[in-house]
Image (cartoon, rainbow, N blue to C red):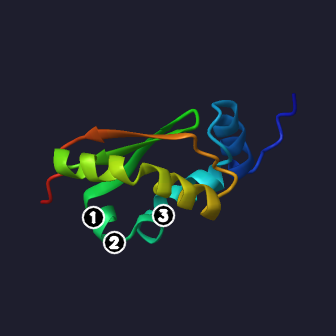
Amino acid sequence: MSRDPRALKASLSRVTESLGAGDALSLAAVFSEWPDLVGEGLAARARPAAIRQRTLVVAVDDPAWATQLRWITSSVLERLNQAIPTACFDAIDIVVRAAPRRA
């Protein structure tokens, strides 16, 4: 094993791919492009929180938004996988969490 410095991108991608979650740049795109992928209205109430294997965990701030997101899960998955094909999500897990408080 070489002790030479490695690019952070390559190291992060190795870790994320070993977890079954795709390459690091694709995963970063999910978080950074979320409003464009799901629309500003939904993005204001639902945000990607984690990636577990091929499941995107999305946190919503109200149970009503969890219900709304459940209704459109298949279309959100389709948009995600079309926009970021290397991410390849199989499912979305929706959790209700209070929005972070602003100072």
Badge 2 element: helix
Q: Residue at x 58, y 44 (%)?
A: 89
Q: What's the amino acid at mark 1?
A: Ala
Residue under numbered circle 3: 32
- Rendering coords of residue 82 (x, y %): 63, 61
Residue under numbered circle 1: 44
Residue neighbourhood size for the residue with mark 1, other residues' Cα within 10 Å, grouped as few (<14), some (14–19), many (≥20): some
Point out the frontmost of discs 3 and 1.
1
Indicate whether 31 appears above or below 55.
Answer: below
In the depicted view, which residue is nearer to us: 94 or 47? 94
Q: What's the amino acid at mark 3?
A: Ser
Q: Residue at x 23, y 40 (%)?
A: 96
Is residue 82 something one can see in this rendering?
Answer: yes
Q: Is residue 5 left or right of residue 2?
A: left
- Rendering coords of residue 97 (x, y %): 22, 41
- Rendering coords of residue 29 (x, y %): 56, 60
- Rendering coords of residue 30 (x, y %): 52, 57
Q: CA distance from mark 3 to mark 1?
A: 13 Å
Indicate whether 54 appears above or below 82.
Answer: above
In the depicted view, which residue is nearer to us: 89 or 100? 89
Q: CA distance from mark 2 to mark 1?
A: 6 Å
Res 39 → quadrant: bottom left
Q: Residue furthest right?
A: 1
Say the numbered circle drawn on residue 40.
2
Q: What's the amino acid at mark 2?
A: Glu
Q: CA distance from mark 2 to mark 3?
A: 13 Å
Quarter in which the N terminus is drawn: top right
Q: Residue at x 74, y 47 (%)?
A: 10
